[in-house]
Structures are given as structure tokens and as C-alpha cells.
Image (cartoon, helix red, strand yellow):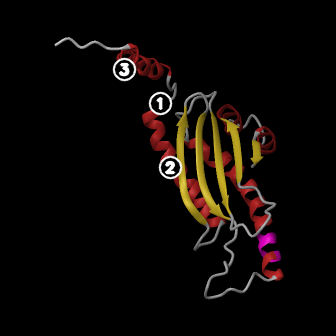
Amino acid sequence: MHLKLKRPGRALLICLACWPLGVRCVNGQWPTANVSALKGEMKVFEAVIDGTMAQTFAPPFGLLEKTQGTYLPGFGLAFSLEVNLYPMRVPTPFNMAPLSKAEVEKAQKVKQDRIVTVKESVPRLLADHAMSLRDLGQNDSIAVVVHLFEVRTGESKFPEQIIVEIRKADLDEFWDKKTSYQDLLGKMKVLEL
């Protein structure tokens, strides 16, 4: 029996035959870093971030999502976690009373203070502990993305994420005592989304 393929069938067959070649090329360009060693270092750094944030944001609802790290070829490492700025009472069928003005004002103040705390603690954390990421390439970057959980009670003036990014080379200069902590802060990118 002879199978005759039409144009779409041939194209599909050719794509399937060539697909492993394309994957091999992409894999050939991948990391310059020692990925297997980097995985272990990432786990340690994830635990350090979790410990720092757990101390910063009190239980029971401070750290909502444990830190997850990933290696992105061409960029470096990205760590992501979610924290609750301030657990607020949510009206329920058992307590329909709306939030009082005092509750809202207190929550706003605490949230503002905690955002400042995140923006101060993450750069310090990178300066003090990212040294453990020895197998990351010199030209790679490290980013920590803190997702800020907030129960929306109308229009919010707070960011949903705070991202702190720094190049590994800049951290190495700091660890080698070639630059001060203030100079390092000047090289860090802090973005609020």
C-alpha cells in the first residue's frame, strides 16, 4: 500500500523530522553557567529569601507563596514570591460591617511601611547572601520579584510587584570590597509595577 501525502501532510512530516535538530541547536546555545551546581545554590538562596520575608511579614498570612527560582538563559536568575502586605478583615455573611475609616487608615499606613521595608530588605539580602550563587555567570543578572497581595477595596495606590535587579558582576565588586554598599544600591534597579 502506497501512502500519498498532500502538501499539509508533507509539511507536517518535514517539521516533525526536523524538530529534534532545532531542539539540539537551542540546547547547544544554552547556559554558560554550571546548571547542576546552580540548582543547589538556588535552593539555598530561596530558603534565605523565605526566611528573611517570614521575619519581615508576620504569620499567619505574611508569606503566601514560597520563593521559586529559575534560570533564564541570556538573563540569569529570577526569584519570585508572594507576600501579604497587611491582612485585612473582609466582610463576610457573618460580619457584613464595612471596614471603618480607622481600619482603612491603619491598613494604608502599614502597607506603605511594609513596601518601604521590602525595598530596603531585598537589596540588603542580595548584598549579603547572593554570594552563594557562585556558579552564575559574571555577565548574568539576579532579580527578585515580590508580588504584593492585597485585598482590593476600591482604587488601590499600591504596586502589585516590586522587582529588584542587579548584575552579578556588580555584586562581585561589592564582595571584593571594590565598591561600597551605597554604590551597589545605585547600580540596583528597583521597579514598582
Residue 7 disc label: none
Q: Nearer the viewer, mark 3 or mark 1?
A: 3
| Residue in view at x 78 percent, y 80 percent | 103
Q: Nearer the viewer, residue 183 or 36?
A: 36
Identified by mark 3, the residue type is Leu
Indicate the position of residue 175 as horizontal and vertical percent values: 67, 39
Residue closest to the far left:
1
Q: Nearer the viewer, mark 2 or mark 3?
A: 3
Dominant secondary-structure state across the stretch colored magenta: helix
Q: Which residue is mark 3?
A: 16
Indicate the position of residue 139 as horizontal and vertical percent values: 64, 27
Q: Give the secondary structure at mark 3.
A: helix
Residue 44 disc label: 2
Whichever of callouts 2 and 3 sits on the residue coming sooner in the sequence is: 3
| Distance (Cα) linking label 3 and label 1 | 31 Å
Tell whether position 1 is magenta: no
Q: Is residue 148 left or right of residue 14?
A: right
Q: Is residue 35 left or right of residue 130?
A: left
| Distance (Cα) linking label 2 and label 3 | 40 Å
| Distance (Cα) linking label 1 and label 2 | 16 Å
Magenta range is 105-110
Indicate the position of residue 8 as horizontal and vertical percent values: 40, 18
Q: Give the secondary structure at mark 2.
A: helix
| Residue in view at x 71 percent, y 45 percent | 164
Examine the image and state in which quarter residue 87 appears. bottom right
Q: Which residue is mark 1?
A: 34
| Residue in view at x 46 percent, y 40 percent | 39
Q: Nearer the viewer, residue 27 or 164?
A: 27
* Disc 1 residue crowd, few under 14, some 14–19, many 20+, Cα 10 Å: few
Tell whether position 108 is magenta: yes
